[in-house]
Amino acid sequence: MDYKMIVLDLDDTLLRDDHSISERTKKALMSAQQQGVKVVLASGRPTYGMHSIAEELSLKEYGSFILSFNGAKIIDAKTKEEHFSSTLPPNIVHKLYDISQSEGVGIHTYVEDWIISENEHPYTLREGEITGLPVKKVESFVQSVTDPVVKVLMVEEPEKLIQVEEKLKKEFDGKLSIMRSKPYFLEFLEAGVTKGTSLDVLIKTMGIKREEVIAVGDSYNDLAMIEFAGLGVAMGNAPDDIKEIANYVTDSNMNDGVAKVVEKFILAPVQN
C-alpha cells in the first residue's frame, strides 16, 4: 500500500518518556515528509502544547495539521487556522463538576491559556507539566466557566477513575464522548468527537482515503483512530486490549517504535 499520511499520538507514542523525539524517529519522519507523506499529530493535549513538536518536525513547511484536544480541534500547522472545532456548553461543564464532587474526583478544564481547577490536584499539576500550560486555582470552578470549553478532565487514581468511567459512560451514552487518555485522565468531549472522527474530517478535505492512512497510538483515546485507519498500529507499551484491536504492533516509545513503523511501511517500499 502506498501510504499518504501517518497520524501520531504524542505522549508514550511519538515522544519518549522525557518528552523528546529520538533522532532515529525524527530522521524517519523527515524522510517520509520529503517523499510527500503527511505527518499529522493527534493528541489529547491542547493546541498550545503541540506547536513546539509540530515545529520540530517542520509540519508547517510540509503543509500538515494538528488534531488537538483528542480531535476536538483541527489546526493548520502553517496558518494556525482552525479547520474544525467542537465545544461543551457551560451547563454540561457545570453538571460534570457536580458529578466530580459527588464522586470525589478532581476536575479541570481550559479557559483561555489556563488550566483551571479549584484545587491543585496532583494529576492536574501533571497535566500542566505535560502541556506547558499554567494551572490557575480558582475559588469557583462553575463561576469561572461562563463560555463553552473544548473539553473537561476528571482526574484521580486509576482504580477509582475506572469506576467513574463505567458509571458515566452509561449515564451519558450518546450525549458525550468519554475516554481515558492516561490511566489517571478521564476526558469529556462533545458527543461523537474522537481522534477517529476528526481524522475522517481531515482526510476528506485532503482527498486521502482511509486505506492510505497509518495511525499510531498507545492508549484508549487512540482507539478510534487506530480502528479507523487503513493500518492501525499499537505501540509496544500499549495495553493488551489496544494491541488486540490494532492491525500491527510496533516497539515501545523508548525503542523507536514510531521510526520502525515509518521505515517498514513507508520508507522501505519506496527503496525497494
Image (cartoon, rainbow, N blue to C red):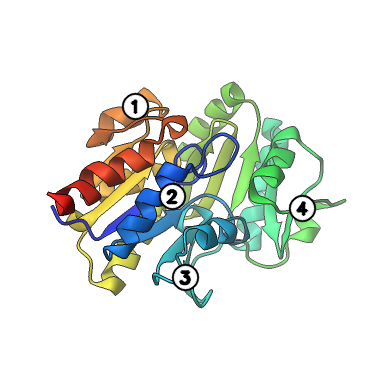
The amino acid beneath tag 2 is Lys
| Other-residue count near label 1 (Cα within 10 Å), few / some / many at <14 / 14–19 / ≥20 | few
**Dot 1 lies on which element?**
helix
Q: Which residue in the structure is indicated by mark 4?
A: 134
In the image, which is nearer the foreground, mark 3 or mark 4?
3
The amino acid beneath tag 4 is Pro
Instruction: Inspect this view and state whether residue 169 appears.
Output: yes
Q: CA distance from mark 3 to mark 1?
A: 35 Å
Q: Nearer the viewer, residue 165 or 25?
A: 25
Indicate the quadrant where residue 133 lies. bottom right
Residue 134 located left or right of residue 214:
right
Q: Which residue in the structure is indicated by mark 1?
A: 241
In the image, which is nearer the foreground, mark 3 or mark 1?
3
- In this rendering, the count of numbered labels is 4
In the image, which is nearer the foreground, mark 2 or mark 3?
2
- Using the image, determine if residue 251 lies above or below residue 20: above
**Label of residue 26 in the image:** 2
Q: CA distance from mark 2 to mark 3?
A: 15 Å
The amino acid beneath tag 1 is Asp
Residue 240 located left or right of residue 164:
left
Contact (Cβ within 8 Å) of mark 3 with mark 4: no
